Amino acid sequence: MGKNLKYWIAFSLFSKIGPTRFKRLRNYFPNMREAWNASAQELKRAGLEENIVREFVGERKKIDPDFELEKVNKAGVNVATINDPVYPKLLKEIYDPPFLLYYKGNLSKEDEFSLSVVGSRKFSFYGKEVTNNIIRELALNKITIVSGLALGIDALSHQATLRAKGKTIAVLGNGLDRVYPISNSKLADEIVSSFGALISEFPLGTPPMKHHFPQRNRIISGLSLGTLVVEAGKESGALITAKCALEQNREIFAVPGNIYSETSQGTNHLIKMGAKPITQAADILDALNLTQVATFVENKKIIPETKEILLKFLSREPVHVDRLAELSKLNIATVNSTLTMMEMKGKTRNLGGNNYVVAR
């Protein structure tokens, strides 16, 4: 990827080549260097429309891929292409994933256990309390909280996660060389310094244009197993994120509110349309089968040899945990926690009554 990365970055500067057109280029050319330097005829053969090709051929003369790569490096921004292992797995599964992500901070496999939280910029005291309480519990259960760094429920979600020492990801609708809104600049810094991440598909220098935010919302929902809408008016942008989640076949949760409150009209409507009503964090953990995530994350610290030891004594025949502890010479707590992690990774199956078999 090294020598090709600058061409991925260069393509991201031409906004009319989005996920669909870029996919055509990837399918046609052996690498992005050849795509970038291709003739107009070849670009058309790759599936790009004539007017797009004409515009692109003119624009690329103004873009220096080496300079753009250097600019990204100087800004301390990381880049993940859709081919990179660090690229979020859940996001890759949506219909139109960004072909490239700019990010600051940390992305990890544990981010697969994530929930998007969105809501109104103008929140009520009720919305604030609900957000603080539910997000705190989710963060303590090692769920990564994804939101958009906007004023209101978004910012409250990030802040509640940080207070609980959890991980949160903010998706921006502009380049990562600026923070919007500027009043959340300190919050953005705290997210990065707390091993969270700031993410954007927009190249450096991109301003926060109005039409960027609906586009950004599909990433917020796409990064997560489900989307929680805390408070939302009838025309709230949070409902766009919920719509994206629906199109991505992800779960939609909503906090019921006062039927006379403007900030609850959107959430109450979502519930009428089939969203799961949520009154506590446990409702979400149960619905997404995430009750064991905290155990799983903690037990990733267990050395691989422990798993290998247990696998020696597991077969198609059920074995009780007490017998496994006896055979492996491991204490029962280590056996139980390792089996939980192995089950979540599809290595074992619990048949009930603490009897386990190998899953192959």
Image (cartoon, helix red, strand yellow):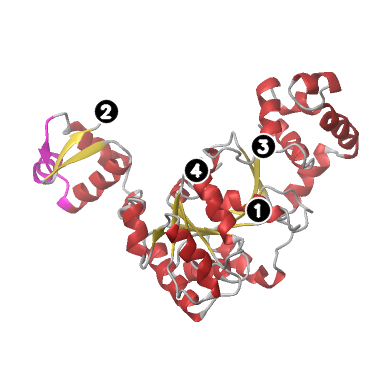
Q: Between disc 4 and disc 1, whose residue precedes?
A: 4
Q: Residues within 10 Å of mark 2 (few under 14, many from 20)?
A: few
Tell me whether the residue at label 1 lies in contact with that at label 3, contact meaning CB atoms closer than 8 angstroms.
no
Left or right of residue 55: residue 228: left
Foreground: disc 4 or disc 1:
1
Instruction: Measuring from the top left, give residue 283's x and y in whole percent.
Output: 33, 61
Instruction: Measuring from the top left, give residue 357's x and y in whole percent.
Output: 17, 35
Q: Secondary structure at mark 4?
A: helix
The one nearer the camera, 280 or 37, is: 280
Instruction: Measuring from the top left, give residue 168's x and y in whole percent.
Output: 51, 60
Q: Which residue is mark 4?
A: 90
Q: Which residue is mark 1?
A: 214
Q: Between disc 2 and disc 3, whose residue precedes?
A: 3
Q: Residues within 10 Å of mark 1 (few under 14, many from 20)?
A: some
Foreground: disc 1 or disc 3:
1
Q: Between disc 1 and disc 2, whose residue precedes?
A: 1
Q: Residues within 10 Å of mark 3 (few under 14, many from 20)?
A: some
Question: Which amino acid, mark 3?
Answer: Pro
Tell me whether the residue at label 4 lies in contact with that at label 1, contact meaning CB atoms closer than 8 angstroms.
no
Q: Secondary structure at mark 3?
A: helix
Q: Which residue is mark 2?
A: 360
Q: Is residue 106 above or below residue 88?
A: below
Question: Which amino acid, mark 4?
Answer: Leu
- CA distance separating discs 4 and 1: 19 Å
In the image, what residue occupies the spot 85% across and 23% down?
40
Q: Is residue 149 above or below residue 99?
A: below
Left or right of residue 268: residue 192: right
Q: Between disc 4 and disc 3, whose residue precedes?
A: 3
Q: Which residue is mark 3?
A: 19
Q: Which residues are magenta?
A: 317-332
Foreground: disc 2 or disc 3:
3
